[in-house]
Image (cartoon, rainbow, N blue to C red):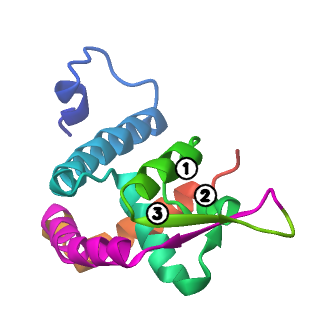
Amino acid sequence: MPARLRDEIKQGKPFANSEVEAYLNLLRTSDALARGVEQALKPSGLTQSQYNVLRILRGAGTDGLVCRELSERMVARDPDITRLLDRLEARGLVTRLRDRKDRRAITVRITAEGTRLADRLDRPIAALHRQQLSHLGTGRVRQLIRLLEQARQSKE
């Protein structure tokens, strides 16, 4: 079997084990797929994390979500959710409201403009994902999903 990843990253010696090679392949693939999404989002001025927040809040409906819950639902955890929300709020895409009973709780809601932007991006992003992965075929994509879910269940 050809050493494709080794060639791509110009590594002369073999990987320590298959798990290391699989992990590095995941990182390399994730980076390649993410670059495509970054390019697709660039004209809208959103990052992947910001788009993810808009999608989550759109799904949450008019009740919105408290920051902690929003952070837990993100695909990729963002350690600085406050700054991310600052940027979205400055653009008028979300609103934040401090709870009167519990001043620590801040509820975040998507605005009409945020909903329109997320709606406008859904189709192109879905098309990009099809372009990125459809060559694998439905069966392999489903198998990939199962394998990735199993990998996340590993013992830490």
| Residue at the image position 21 percent from the left and 32 percent from the top | 3
For the magenta stretch, what is the residue range? 103-132
Instruction: Write down the quadrant of residue 152 in the picture.
Output: bottom right
Dot 2 or dot 1, earlier in sequence = 2
Q: Residue furthest bottom?
A: 62
What distance separates the C-alpha of mark 2 from that of mark 1?
A: 7 Å
User: Can you say which quadrant of the picture contains the N terminus?
Assistant: top left
Question: Badge 2: how crowded within 10 Å, few (<14), some, or many (20+)?
Answer: some
Front residue of 97/42: it is 97
The secondary element bearing badge 1 is classed as loop
Say the numbered circle drawn on residue 53.
3
Total numbered labels? 3
* Relative to 153, residue 100 above or below: below
Q: Position of residue 81 (x, y in %)?
A: 56, 48
Residue type at mark 1?
A: Arg
Q: Dots 1 and 3: beta carbons under 8 Å?
A: no
Looking at the rendered structure, the secondary structure element under dot 3 is: helix
**Residue 54: in magenta span:** no
Q: Which residue is mark 1?
A: 77
Estimate how packed mark 3 is, as few (under 14), some (14 to 19) or many (20 or more) residues with alpha carbons within 10 Å: many
Say whether residue 82 is left or right of residue 123. right
Q: Which dot marks residue 71? A: 2
Instruction: Mark 2 and mark 1 in contact? Answer it, CB < 8 Å.
Output: yes
Please state which of residues 29 and 51 is positioned toward the viewer in this rendering: 51
- Left or right placement of residue 16 versus residue 124 in this view: right
